[in-house]
C-alpha cells in the first residue's frame, strides 16, 4: 500500500493529541520521575564543567545573573 499524505486523508482519520494526560503525569511524579530528572541535570552539569576545564574556558563567563562587568 502506498503512503498517503495527511492532506489526502479525511479529518477523522487522524487522532488529535493535546499533550500528556494528567493521569500519566501523576503516575510519573509518584514513581520519582522528578528525582531522576534532577540526577540527570546534575550529571549533565558535571560533564559541562569538566569540558570547560578541559578546554581552558572555565570561569571566563563572569558572574551568573547577567551582571554587566562594564
Image (cartoon, rainbow, N blue to C red):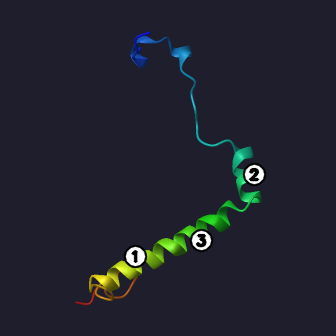
43 to 1, vertically: above or below: below
Q: Which residue is mark 3?
A: 39
Identify the element where label 1 is drawn: helix
Residue at the spot x=28%, y=87% of the render? 60
Mark 3 Cα shell of 10 Å, populated few (<14), some (14-19), many (≥20): few
Q: Camera-side residue: 68 or 64?
A: 64
Residue designated by label 2: 27
Residue under the point 22% across and 90% down: 70
**What residue is rendered at 51% in x and 15% in y?**
11
Query: From the viewer's perspective, is residue 12 above or below residue 63?
Result: above
Q: Are marks 2 and 3 in contact (CB under 8 Å)?
A: no
Q: Is residue 18 above or below residue 61?
A: above
Which comes sooner in the sequence, label 2 or label 3? 2
The percent position of residue 69, horizontal first and vertical second, equals 26, 90
Residue farthest toward the left in the current orientation of the protein: 70
Q: CA distance from mark 1 to mark 2?
A: 31 Å
Q: Is residue 22 visible?
A: yes
Residue 29 in the image, given as x and y percentages of width and height: 72, 58
Question: Residue 57 vs residue 6: left or right?
Answer: left
Q: CA distance from mark 2 to mark 3?
A: 19 Å
Q: Is residue 42 left or right of residue 7?
A: right
Task: Check residue 48 in the rendering and tell me which mark sits there, or answer none.
Answer: 1
> Mark 1, residues whose alpha carbon is within 10 Å: few (<14), some, or many (≥20)?
few
Foreground of the two, 13 or 36: 36
Of mark 3 and mark 1, the one earlier in the sequence is 3
Which of disc 2 and disc 1 is earlier in sequence?
2
Mark closer to the observer (1, 2): 1
Task: For the N terminus, give its image quadrant.
Answer: top left
Whether pointer 3 and pointer 1 mark residues with C-beta atoms closer than 8 Å, the reply is: no
Count the numbered circles shown: 3
Which one is in front in this view, the residue at disc 2 or the one at disc 3? Answer: 3
Give neighbour class at mark 2: few <14, some 14-19, many 20+ (Cα, 10 Å): few
Amino acid at each position: 500500500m502506498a503512503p498517503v499524505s495527511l492532506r489526502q486523508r479525511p479529518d477523522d482519520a487522524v487522532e488529535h493529541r493535546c499533550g500528556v494526560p494528567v493521569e500519566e503525569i501523576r503516575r510519573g511524579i509518584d514513581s520519582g520521575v522528578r528525582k531522576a530528572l534532577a540526577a540527570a541535570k546534575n550529571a549533565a552539569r558535571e560533564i559541562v564543567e569538566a569540558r570547560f576545564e578541559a578546554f581552558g574556558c572555565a570561569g571566563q563567563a563572569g558572574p551568573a545573573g547577567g551582571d554587566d562587568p562594564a
